[in-house]
Amino acid sequence: MKRFNWRPLVVVAALILAWQWALGGGKLVSDTLAPPGPVAAALFEMLRDGSVLQASFQTLLAALLGLALGAGIGTALGLASGILPPVGTAIRGPVEVLRPLPAIALVPLMTIIFGLGLDMEVYVVAFAVVWPSIILTQTAVRHVERRLLEVADVLELSYLARIRKIVLPAILPRLVVMLRFTAAIALLIAVTVELVSNPWGLGHEMMVASQDMAPARMIAFLFVITAIGWCLNWALVTAERHLLP
Amino acid sequence: MSRRLRNLATDLAAISCLLVLWYVAAAASWVPPAFVPSPVAVYQRLISGFADGSLLVETARTVIAMLAGWFACSLLGIVVGSIIGIWPLARQSLGPVLEIFRPMPPAAVIPIAIAIFGLSPEMSLVVVLFGAIWPALLATVHGFSSVEPRLKEVGQALTLSPLAFIWKIALPNATPDIIAGMRLSLVVSLVLVVITDMITGQPGLGSLVVLASRTFDMAGLFAGLVLLSLIGLVSNAAIVAVERRLLAYQR
Amino acid sequence: MANALKLGSKPATPLPAAPAPNAAPDPIITFADVGFAYGGPAVLSHVSFTVAPGTVTCVIGPSGCGKTTVLRLVAGFLRASSGVVTVAGVPRTRPTRDVAVVFQDYGRALLPWRDVYGNVSLALEAAHVRRAERRARIESMLALVGLENHARKFPSELSGGMQQRLQIARCLAQDPKILLMDEPFGALDAMTRGILQDELLRIQEERGVSVLFVTHDIEEALYLGNQVVALIANPGRVSQRVEVPLPFPRNQLATREHPEFLRLRRALFHLTHGHEG
């Protein structure tokens, strides 16, 4: 059993104390930032009146729908380009050119087409997620054991049977890792879209709190956002550990 | 070498096909012209924008802000990251704490930065710094903390001074991780510059895109998107080229 | 190549009008003046031999002589650059289910996420055998290779010898006409090797499958084969083809001490070691 590492806890405690010291005495303007006490109180209040739950639900909904759409398309394209090399060659150029475009830059365009709301956010998230999905799936397919593909040749497996019985099970571990990565991106983009424009979700609540001069609430929302990201990651890591031998 | 050229030619061909498709889609109105302009219009906007300097200013500002933020982040991230990575006490105490910040969206510091600095260029810089530093920092910590134990023993056997050890063994060992982290930091830096531009409205491609959308200037909007793509593409290609040179021994 | 009929010579007595009723059956594998190159120097050149159905042919030679290439040509992974490789009278162009391949790196040829039962099942699924019929056939395959008590284990839980047996079971489940084996026992210890050699002979006799067996081990080749084809390198070509008239069933002790075994061993040793490169 590893000895319990208490040092980070000391650091965290020190940080909280420093935070309290810096702001508790009203040293910094108190309508832009807040010390730990009021933040904890605001957190409690948000949980009690359910505003946090509703906002979290909205953000997560957009993030997960966008993830499903983007990762779905990306994985399919990545698989296709692994099985049929011409597909991979054809999409390589467009992927290289479209990938560097920051997804957020699409918000004004998507707003014109879809207006504000869930749709717009889902499409922006999907755009951000599709490129890493394609690339990571392609890498995963490339790493499928060569011998297994030769066995598939000998057994004269159809394309569909090959994918179902050999390729997909072989790349599953990498796909789970990819999911962890793309889920984090999805959440991040969703929150950012809300920060910038979409009038719902955690990002929007945080922005509103900032503009309303309610710093405790604002910082509390920051903690909620980080905590959700952390939980999502932990959930996927656990799933990964169960799926992988 | 010729395979790289062949790949480049294929990619350009594929992109050209896409452009042709775009042109046809716009010309035949398969997509509403109110949403998607013709690539010809976008091209003309790009040319005229650079000829009269308007686009040049916006692009330059975005690129400079991105690079400035990125340099600062990388420097700070590498220095702090190397200290944490090498010093066991720091690594045990701060490592897990830093990991807490990993899932935090870089843009989430924006409301706090706005609260402190208002909608100003200082806010932009602070946001980029605090948002884009994480990839460089975390990657550097990982790079320095993952020195092969055998190599540490070699350093001890050769009685290398701590500085010599860092310079000759730890740093080269960490270089692949550091470069990967810097690449990511550059991406985040660009994203944050665009976002802060969009929020503050200060000159840059982010605010250009927002303004163009408000006036339904679709050609301008798409011109901005094209430029942003190019900036990301070129800057990433530059880092990849440097990486390939530095890590040639890995082939 | 020391050989019988020289083209163009007149036979001493007139040939019979029709082939005799007990004439040898058509070969199941033929190499007719086969050459192969990846685009550079020839890996194989002017390789010719045949394999009679229901027999074991062993291909031996030093490393780099192209023995694996010979196997992969029959498997259908490669196509001859010149000459023709035929299987059951049909020129070979791509892999088919009736020619099974037992790879040397068995660990990489098994599905790590399926258990022993599932791995054998793959071959039957590929042949579109209905689920109801699969069970009986899988169980009989496992019994044939002696893995019937390990059906639910995963490859990572099996020893090297057992993994190779599993691969053989999957290959036999394809109900193949031909079994191609690429140094299948090379990665195993000597004792396991001996056991598997005898199992292979037993299975081959039971099923009547034709075997093309690549190995660098002369003794293994003589022990297993009805015929041994010896290749030499640079470029890969046939240097000698010998029939092995040793009695069946073979025996690890008796056969290996048989005078004919020792004679052939000496001849092949000089041949392959004298002609290196």
Image (cartoon, rainbow, N blue to C red):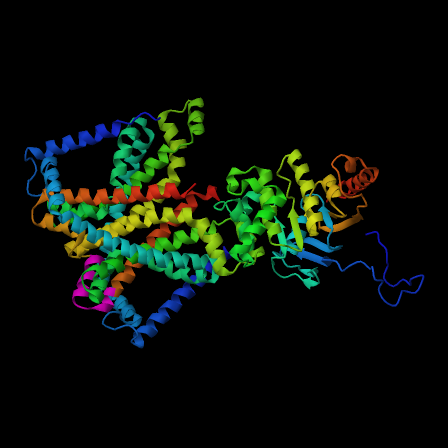
Query: C123 or B114: nearer the eye?
Result: C123
Q: Looking at the magenta stretch, what is its main secondary structure?
A: helix
Which contiguous range is marked in magenta?
B204-221
Residue lying at 60% horizontally and 54% vertically, measured from the top left: C174
Residue B217 among magenta residues = yes
**Residue sitting nearer the eye, C54 or A192:** C54
Residue C152 among magenta residues: no
Q: Is residue B59 visible?
A: no
In percent of width and height, residue A242 lies at 38, 42
Residue C17 percent coordinates (x, y): 88, 68
Can you give x and y, in whole percent of width and height, for residue C252 in the image? 74, 36
Q: Tell how many labels.
A: 0
Q: Quadrant of residue A8?
A: top left
Q: Quadrant of residue C4?
A: bottom right
Q: Is residue C171 left or right of residue A213?
A: right
Q: Is residue C116 left or right of residue A182?
A: right
Position of C117 with respect to B160 (left or right) is: right
